[in-house]
Image (tube, rainbow, N blue to C red):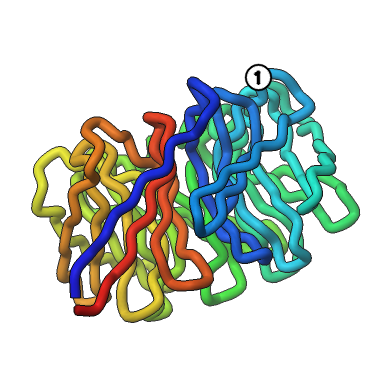
Amino acid sequence: MRVCIREYSIREASSGPYGITAGKDGEMWFTEQKGNRIGRIDANGEIVSYSIPTPNAGAMSIIQNQAGDIWFTEYHASKIGRMSMNGHFIEYELPTENASPFGIAEGADGAIWFTQMGSGKIGRVSQAGEVTEFELADPKSFPSFITPGPDDALWFTLNQKNAIGRITLAGEIQEYPIPTPNSGPVGITSGPDGALWFVQIQGNKIGRMTVTGEVREFLIPTPNARPHAIVSGLHDDLWFTEWGGNRIGQISTRGEIVEYEIPTQHAEPHGIALSPSGEIWFAEECNQIGRLGLIRE
């Protein structure tokens, strides 16, 4: 078994790809933070882009919901974007100014949940398009990524509070501290073992938290790797980007870590996603989309 990494350049200069997700059409969809577009890339590396209606929206995180629509956060515009597969956009303006929406996820209730870095709130867009906001205890806690948990709640990282948050579908909030001081949690995902897994960009660790708040931490071999995003793999593993280490990391649920170097130097990998075929795709701020596959020999 060996690893093959391919990279695909985006034609438009200064695209700044950030978030990436798998679509129901079998393609991968990504945000172009600097280019103000939503991009789609197929298995052959062909890219099509759709311009976001709001100028300089600052598109960051992206998901596809069960209905098949693309949803994304507009960090600079304080809006939540929604796009159909044929490129039709709807944008939902948030009640709070300078909310800086960042992470996004679909809840068990079918609503879209998101974090607001600027205002220290968790937001929710109902299927009817109604926006609700829930205030956190500390408005400067910097909520970052968010993911649906195995308990039907939403779990999110509190980057400046060094904690993991949990919000129920009814809006009840709990917070759980991380043992490593000033660890800077960012990406978070539900693992194949029923726990929440998250990266610590300052602590240089991968964390695992049970739904009762028990934490284990695993040190990344590369110093100053600055892990950013994380996603569950096909098997008993998870994958994460190393912004500082210029690598893609793989961690088993037992805590064993393997790292794979990205061919392009200073690629600055951010978002990461699993394709329907089992490959790992990631967004490189250097204007490329990366693809990692395992080849059996």
- Quarter of the rendering containing residue 189: bottom left
* Residue 95 spot, x, y in % from top left: 79, 31
- How dense is the environment of label 1, judged by Cα within 10 Å: few (below 14), some, or many (20 and up)? some
In the rendered image of this protein, does residue 86 appear above or below residue 27? above
**Three-letter code for the amino acid on which mark 1 is drawn:** Asn
Whole-percent x and y of residue 251? 24, 66
Is residue 31 depicted above or below 266 in this figure?
Answer: below
Q: Which residue is drawn at 66% across and 58% down?
A: 64
Image quadrant assignment for residue 195: bottom left
Residue 36 image point, x, y percent: 63, 26
In this rendering, the answer to whether 48 lies above or below 207 is: above
194 versus 153 height, above or below: below
- Is residue 239 in view from this perspective? yes
Q: Nearer the viewer, residue 155 or 279?
A: 279
Horizontally, is 204 left or right of 142 in the view? left
Q: Is mark 1 on a helix, strand or loop?
A: loop
Q: Which of 291 and 205 is in front in this view?
A: 291
Report the residue at 56% width, 65% height from top.
148
Residue at the image position 34 percent from the left and 67 percent from the top? 209
Residue carrying label 1: 56
Image side of residue 12 versus residue 38, left or right: left
Q: Position of residue 214 (x, y in %)?
A: 31, 69
Q: Which residue: 43% across, 43% down?
A: 289
**Residue sticking out furthest to the right:** 128
Quadrant of the image for the N terminus? bottom left
Residue 136 shows in the view? no
Q: In which quarter of the image is residue 112?
A: bottom right
Left or right for 43, reference 83: left
